[in-house]
Image: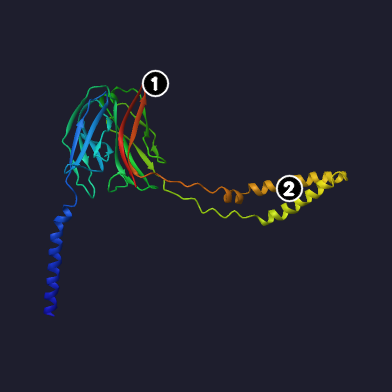
Amino acid sequence: MRGIFRRNLRLDLIAGLGIALAMPALAASSAATTTTLTAGTLSGCTQPLSLTVLASGAAASGTVTIADEFNGETVQLGSVALSAKGVASPSLSLATGSHILTANFAGNSSYASSSSSSVAVSVTAECDFMPAVSNITPATTPVNTLTAGESGTATVSIFPLTSYAASLTEPVFVTLSCSNLPDTVTCSFTPENVEIMPGQTTAVTSSMLIQTVAETTSANRPAKNSTPIAWAFLLPGALGLGGIAWGVRRHRWISRLSLMALIGLVTLMGTTACNPRYGYKNHAPTTNSGTPSGAYNVKVTAQSSNGVTATTLSTAFALTVK
């Protein structure tokens, strides 16, 4: 018994040593990355950004989220999918005031996560509110990923500028929409119109639903066979009409009978051709290719109007379909 115990102990020690030796290799499986964020020339409320994520000098793939420290609160403004070169160029709408932007690369099985240095931006234009997209579900790896046929949700927040809300004398409605969607994908909001109340200092929110479409194939089309019952009526009827036509000059009553038989024959043929079984056999459903896979940057837009001028602001939302 003592010998068996010692042998098992040796095996456990060897197994533990193997795991310990493998740990550094597992930890090193994700390449270290460097995320760079650069702010372009501010145009009113719109801030162009340039993002680059590199891993040992090579381009990384995945999703980058942009965080904003504004009015003492950190807000996730949006997200963007990197191109094959590891870059992205989103444009985000910012409210009037001072902002500190940071880009956060989520990482994946191939690349480790990383964050950029902070970039300070000061917006002086009269920008009344700021849209943001966050709380994306389901939580996936890589982030913001849906399989064709799945649906996902996110929270769209509208952050009103304090001075703007204080100047309101009545509620203002902001209409939400999205664009740059992949084929077959739909986007909806609940509610579609959010309301900013006078003096409001907190964000108003709406739930965004993204619905993709799964690939479907048409059912096997049945063989085009004849309908025995239809032929049982059509063939004798056709032969009878031929005989009636031959003798129509001799008997007037035969002419009337032939007209009635012709009407009946045409009715029977129309009924046979238009029945659902005929349509299913000869017009099978078409194939639906579903939502194409790929990485997409969806644009979420918020628009309000005072009856004279409209204010349109937007943010980005990264979506990957597999």
What is the x, y in percent for residue 66?
24, 36
Q: Secondary structure at mark 2?
A: helix
Residue 68 got which mark?
Answer: none
Residue drawn at the location 71% of the way across and 46% of the way down: 267
What is the x, y in percent for residue 143?
28, 45
Residue 265 got which mark?
Answer: 2
Residue drawn at the location 14% of the way across and 78% of the way down: 4
Q: Amino acid at mark 1?
A: Gly
- Few, some or many C-alpha atoms within 10 Å of disc 1 (few <14, some 14-19, many ≥20)? few
Instruction: Decide if residue 167 is on the left or right side of residue 3.
Output: right
Q: Is residue 74 visible?
A: no
Residue drawn at the location 45% of the way across and 46% of the way down: 288
Q: Nearer the viewer, residue 240 or 117?
A: 240
How many marks on residues? 2
Q: Nearer the viewer, residue 109 or 138?
A: 109
Instruction: Decide if residue 265 is on the left or right side of residue 77.
Output: right
**Viewer-nearest of labels 1 and 2?**
2
Q: Secondary structure at mark 1?
A: loop
Residue drawn at the location 18% of the way across and 36% of the way down: 36
Residue topped by disc 1: 307
What is the x, y in percent for residue 268?
70, 48
- Few, some or many C-alpha atoms within 10 Å of disc 2 (few <14, some 14-19, many ≥20)? some
The quadrant of the picture occupied by the N terminus is bottom left
In the displayed structure, 16 sits above or below 3; it is above
Q: Nearer the viewer, residue 156 or 148?
A: 148
Q: Residue furthest bottom?
A: 1
Residue 100, located in which quarter of the rendered image? Answer: top left
Distance, label 1 to label 2, CA atoms, is 66 Å
What is the x, y in percent for residue 260?
79, 45
Q: Is residue 58 visible?
A: yes
In the displayed structure, 231 sits above or below 193; it is below
Q: Amino acid at mark 2?
A: Leu
